[in-house]
Amino acid sequence: MAIKWRSHLIIIGLLFALVGTFASCGGDDPVDNDDPNQQPQPTDDCESDDDCGDDRYCILETCYDQAPIDCDDNSQCGADFPYCVEDVCYHSCQLDEHCDHHMEICSDDGQCIPDPAAECIDHDDCGNDYCHDGTCVSEGFICTLQNCAGQRGVCNPEAGADGDCINADSCSSLDACVEGYLCIDNQCEEEDVACADCVGDEQCVFNADTLSVSCEDDSIVCEPAGHRECIDENTLYICSSDGSVQQNVPCPFGCNEDELRCEQSPGETCEDAYEVEDGDSFEFDWIEFSNTYEPDGSEGCIDPADDLRVISSDVVFALEIEPGQVGVVEVYTPFDNTMIYMFEQCPDLDIGEAYSCQEPTGHLVEQLDGQVRRSFWYENSGSQNETVYIVADSAIGAQSDGAVIDITISDQICTPGQSVCSDGELGECS
């Protein structure tokens, strides 16, 4: 029995020796985990990194020697783990959607392969046609799906049915260029570049007829600025001095082609003012005149408290005053419902020009023999003759009243209204 037992031991020992020999020769080489070029080998099933041991990672329920790589798509994964599956790089695809091309499928062994049912994968498979959903189709078919005819730009068949329209190589209209581009000299050009010369309030305006752009200011409505013309015998066309306003002005009394203005009845405006001399006197009714001028206190022509005195009829006088002389306008009315002011520059009301008034040398209001006398005087202290335009204006209540206006132009010997002694008697300077 002892001898037999030893024989069994010897045989068992030989068997272990042979097994060891077979294990060490033939078959795959062992994985060298220190070799950086060695592909990591998946082993063991797992639910978390703890199931894989030290320095190993659980990726989609399989233990790996390589740490997981986060990803959004396949382009972020390397050759060893080429498929982005559930936001990590994995060694095999799981679904068709993990493949790069929509005409590829995920095979049973976890590799993406061309769909056997597809006629084509890309345009190169179709010669002069284009690949669409695995079938070779014409350019017209692709362009119908892109629908560039309904938007800016032209078809780009290379981009496929879902591609965007592109700029035409040569354009003859704005429609051939995508949004943000203009057709300039038959070439699609970026709008910002084409309009670079427009500054400030200027707007870049595209001209479809000439395929060019121009810079235009929306505030300019007429050119040339300041232009006037009589377009017929009773209509004056005016373009304001800054080009911002244009209008056709009716001229009931006719359009003056020489002076390019509407004719007025005498005294209505500065242009048609009564030209007066020393000693002239007028008696009239306010109702004979229009309400041409209506300045307010903010424009320096009158005191703000006198605004209501200038909202009705007015009449204009032109006085030529020599150096050292004083021009005096006196208005006599039953009630204190008038105002006198002088223009520094006559406003062109047709184009909305602002009032510009000049301060008088003096003015005076007084009761005299049951009348109200309002005096206004201006001294020419310069060295040349001056023509001044003095306006007598009225309140609404004055329409039913008459008025008397006296004009004096003379050398100044006293201040109007001042008490003076003459020939031993006390008098008043007129």
Image (spheres, rainbow, N blue to C red):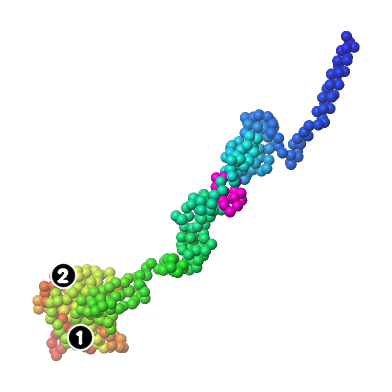
Is 208 located above or below residue 127 in the figure? below
Q: Can residue 171 be seen from the camera position used here?
A: yes
Which label is found at residue 276? 1
The residue sitting at 59% across, 50% down in the picture is 126
Which residues are drawn in magenta? 121-134
When asked about the image quadrant of residue 404, the answer is bottom left
Q: Nearer the viewer, residue 119 or 22?
A: 119
Indicate left or right for 241 with 287 as reference.
right
Question: Helix, strand, or loop for circle 2?
Answer: helix
When asked about the image quadrant of residue 275, the answer is bottom left
Q: Nearer the viewer, residue 298 or 276?
A: 276
On whether residue 57 falls in the magenta region, the answer is no
Q: Disc 1 versus disc 2: distance between alpha carbons? A: 26 Å
Indicate left or right for 76 with 138 as reference.
right
Instruction: Measuring from the top left, give residue 228's x and y in whole percent.
Output: 31, 78
Q: Which residue is mark 2?
A: 396
Mark 2: amino acid = Ile
Q: Can residue 317 be seen from the camera position used here?
A: no
Q: Earlier in the sequence, mark 1 or mark 2?
A: 1
Instruction: Measuring from the top left, give residue 65's x and y in whole percent.
Output: 69, 35
